[in-house]
Image (tube, helix red, strand yellow):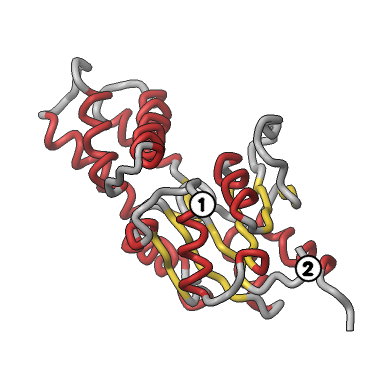
């Protein structure tokens, strides 16, 4: 943790609250639980392509998996309209309540902030602009420009190259244990936000810091920095 210069944020679920997307499934007349199945399947297929040295954009996988998940279910509209209704929800997401203050505290501590998402920079741009914190971030980075999804090592190396700092001077912040594990294996410091109280999977590399809210991070990073 000592020597951290850049804080790297995952976006989906770490910064953004995806709960309203579940409501969009309910709007279609299907159980909201289908939203969890869809998102988990989306990640599965992105990871599978990465493992096979393939690549596809988040939006393309999201659309394809969504149509597969909804197939055969009694929808209140045609498939094209249903898919559009769900995917358009990403443009209207809000950040979690702890994000804005946490981000501003990190910037006030002199840290550089960037995002690294498996999604698009357009979604991150809208989300952070809507929340009034876009100016706190110097870079919005997507794996689209890396050509490989997180948690593959190349995604984290790409972020380090864009920021011009070594991996060991970067801190990855995420709610996903798989992202924490990938960043740690690549050489980054890690901070896990555990808003739900769920246990951390023992088969993944443990995070260096565990938080229940992003507002706790600035103090913990400051405490880890060397004193003059």
Disc 2 residue crowd, few under 14, some 14–19, many 20+, Cα 10 Å: some
Give the SS element for disc 1.
Answer: helix
Q: Quadrant of residue 215?
A: bottom right
Report the side of 66 relative to 16 (left or right). Answer: left
The answer for how far apart the CA atoms under marks 2 and 1 are is 22 Å
Percent of width and height locating residue 48: 37, 34
Q: Quadrant of residue 124?
A: bottom left
Q: Residue furthest front?
A: 53
Q: Residue at x 59, y 53 (%)?
A: 186
Percent of width and height locating residue 174: 58, 50
For the question of whether residue 19 can be seen, the reply is: yes
For the question of whether residue 105 can be seen, the reply is: no
Q: What mark, if any, has residue 20 been given in the picture?
A: none
Report the side of 205 relative to 47 (left or right). Answer: right
Instruction: Identify the residue under disc 2.
Output: 2
**In the rendered view of the protein, which quadrant contains the C terminus?**
bottom right
Q: What mark, if any, has residue 153 been given in the picture?
A: 1
The nearer-to-camera label among 2 and 1 is: 1
Which mark is first along the chain, 1 or 2? 2
Q: Residue furthest bottom?
A: 228
Give the SS element for disc 2.
Answer: loop
Q: Residue furthest right?
A: 228
Q: Residue at x 67, y 65 (%)?
A: 168
Q: Residue at x 42, y 65 (%)?
A: 141
């Amino acid at each position: 943790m000592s020597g951290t210069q850049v804080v790297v944020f995952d976006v989906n679920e770490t910064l953004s609250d995806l709960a309203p997307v579940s409501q969009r499934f309910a709007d279609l007349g299907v159980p909201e639980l289908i939203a969890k199945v869809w998102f988990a399947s989306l990640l599965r297929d992105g990871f599978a392509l990465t493992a096979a040295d393939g690549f596809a954009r988040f939006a393309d996988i999201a659309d394809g998996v969504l149509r597969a998940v909804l197939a055969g279910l009694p929808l209140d509209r045609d498939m094209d309209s249903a898919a559009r209704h769900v995917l358009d929800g990403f443009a209207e997401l809000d950040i979690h309540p702890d994000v804005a203050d946490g981000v501003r505290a990190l910037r006030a501590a002199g840290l550089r902030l960037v995002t690294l998402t498996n999604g698009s920079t357009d979604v991150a741009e809208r989300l952070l602009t809507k929340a009034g914190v876009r100016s706190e971030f110097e870079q919005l980075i997507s794996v689209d420009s890396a050509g490989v999804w997180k948690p593959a090592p190349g995604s984290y190396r790409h972020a380090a190259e864009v920021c011009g700092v070594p991996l060991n001077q970067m801190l990855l912040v995420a709610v996903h244990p798989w992202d924490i594990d990938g960043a740690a294996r690549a050489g980054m410091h890690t901070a896990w936000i555990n808003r739900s109280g769920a246990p951390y999977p023992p088969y993944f590399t443990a995070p260096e810091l565990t938080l229940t809210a992003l507002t706790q991070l600035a103090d913990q990073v400051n405490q880890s920095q060397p004193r003059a």
